[in-house]
């Protein structure tokens, strides 16, 4: 081995040692990095979990604090309704819906919605006089234009229209609000829709004589809350009116049967023919009494003639009533049931009648005497 090779051997040994040191350092650095990353991950998870726990704790505290306030306002609203302070009850319910909605359970939200609808009905019933029937006016076809106002403005407009009893425009405004934002103050909008549909249905039935459209509005209102006793009662009488009118000129007994129940309660209830329940009962009674007179039911006929005449005088009905009364007093028999003289049976050639002997009629013969 020459001198050059001897000099290179120490250098190669040094390089090999440096490489070993370098690899050791790199491996140790990698472990440091991995350890640091793991520590950061653990710290991050702990921070997130702690934050979530803190948020959950704060929400729980807020719910616990909100629950007694909500219950206090609900109890106050119920008491206000019982004592007739409807506006105050409505204010309490508005506060719950506006400030405490996020803390309400589904049961509480449904309860608030029912109370809200009841309150609106009571306010409307106190302020809205009972509409009286009036002639139906032919109105031009209404085509609503798209409403591009904000939902808050639409809500306030609808409130004003409900307050002024403009049911048609209030309904169209609420529909536009729902089309723009289905979830905006959902419970309050449902309550307003109920009161609008309920009152528009009553108006159509009592004032406009539009019975089927009015019944349809009441059915729509019932989707938001149960109908009150007045609306439910009117719906029952209206359905009975339509049923009785369907027998007109077909079965006068059914006409009288239905309208005799209706007209004492709703004498001016009418449909598009402008015939009130009272007039239908009067005319139906005359027609039915005439049928009874023809059938020989004189006493019952006079009874229905008198019912019709007690509503208004009718010369023709008066004459027929007198005729029925005279026949009833005389005990006249119905047509076709008059008594006839007994007929005797003539003996035939085959029969020889002896004194004291009875005659036995042949089948089909009428016995004499």
Image (tube, rainbow, N blue to C red):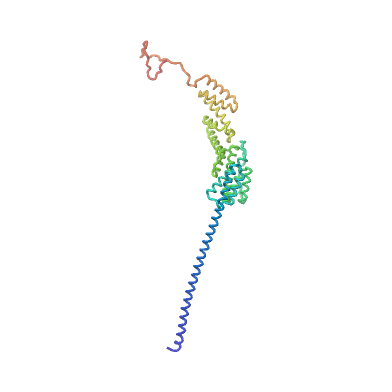
Q: Position of residue 80 (x, y in %)?
A: 59, 44
> Residue 135's quadrant in the figure?
top right
Residue 365 vs residue 232, the one in the foreground: 232
> Residue 368's quadrant in the figure?
top left
Q: Is residue 361 above or below residue 289?
A: above
Rendered residue at 45%/16% (across/down) = 341
Q: Is residue 61 above or below residue 22?
A: above
Residue 235 vs residue 291, the one in the foreground: 235
Q: Is residue 355 left or right of residue 110?
A: left
Residue 88 visible to the viewer: yes
Q: Is residue 365 above or below residue 253?
A: above
Q: Position of residue 14 (x, y in %)?
A: 47, 82
Q: Position of residue 255 (x, y in %)?
A: 53, 31
Q: Is residue 331 above or below residue 115?
A: above
How many discs appear? 0
Residue 16 vs residue 360, the one in the foreground: 16
Residue 193 visible to the viewer: no
Q: Residue furthest top?
A: 355
Q: Position of residue 249 (x, y in %)?
A: 53, 31
Q: Is residue 282 left or right of residue 345?
A: right
* The C terminus lies in quadrant: top left
Q: Residue furthest bottom?
A: 2
* The N terminus lies in quadrant: bottom left
Rendered residue at 58%/27% (across/down) = 310
């Amino acid at each position: 081995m020459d001198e050059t090779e001897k000099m290179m051997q120490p250098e190669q040994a040094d390089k090999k040692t440096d490489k070993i040191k370098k690899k050791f350092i790199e491996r140790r650095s990698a472990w440091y990095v991995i350890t640091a990353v793991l520590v950061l991950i653990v710290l991050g998870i702990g921070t997130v979990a702690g934050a979530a726990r803190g948020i959950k704790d704060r929400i729980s505290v807020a719910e616990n604090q909100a629950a007694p306030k909500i219950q206090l306002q609900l109890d106050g609203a119920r008491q206000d309704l019982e004592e007739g302070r409807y506006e105050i009850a409505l204010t309490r319910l508005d506060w719950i819906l506006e400030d405490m909605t996020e803390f309400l359970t589904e049961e509480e939200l449904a309860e608030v919605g029912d109370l809200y609808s009841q309150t609106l009905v009571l306010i409307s019933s106190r302020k809205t006089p009972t509409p009286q029937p009036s002639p139906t006016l032919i109105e031009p076809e209404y085509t609503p234009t798209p409403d591009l106002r904000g939902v808050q403005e639409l809500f306030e407009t609808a409130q004003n229209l409900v307050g002024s009893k403009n049911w048609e425009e209030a309904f169209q405004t609420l529909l536009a609000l729902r089309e723009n934002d289905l979830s905006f103050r959902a419970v309050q909008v449902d309550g307003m829709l109920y009161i609008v549909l309920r009152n528009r249905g009553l108006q159509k039935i009592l004032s406009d004589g539009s019975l089927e459209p009015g019944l349809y509005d009441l059915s729509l209102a019932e989707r938001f809350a149960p109908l009150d006793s007045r609306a439910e009662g009117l719906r029952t009488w209206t359905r009975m009116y339509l049923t009785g009118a369907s027998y007109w000129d077909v079965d006068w007994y059914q006409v009288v049967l239905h309208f005799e129940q209706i007209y004492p309660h709703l004498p001016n209830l009418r449909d598009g023919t402008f015939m009130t329940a009272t007039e239908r009962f009067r005319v139906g009674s005359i027609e039915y009494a005439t049928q009874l007179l023809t059938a020989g039911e004189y006493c019952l006929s006079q009874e229905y003639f008198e019912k019709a005449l007690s509503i208004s005088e009718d010369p023709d009905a008066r004459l027929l009533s007198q005729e029925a009364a005279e026949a009833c007093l005389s005990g006249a028999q119905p047509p076709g049931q008059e008594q006839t003289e007994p007929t005797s049976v003539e003996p035939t050639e085959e029969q020889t009648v002896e004194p004291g002997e009875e005659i036995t009629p042949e089948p089909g013969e009428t016995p004499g005497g």
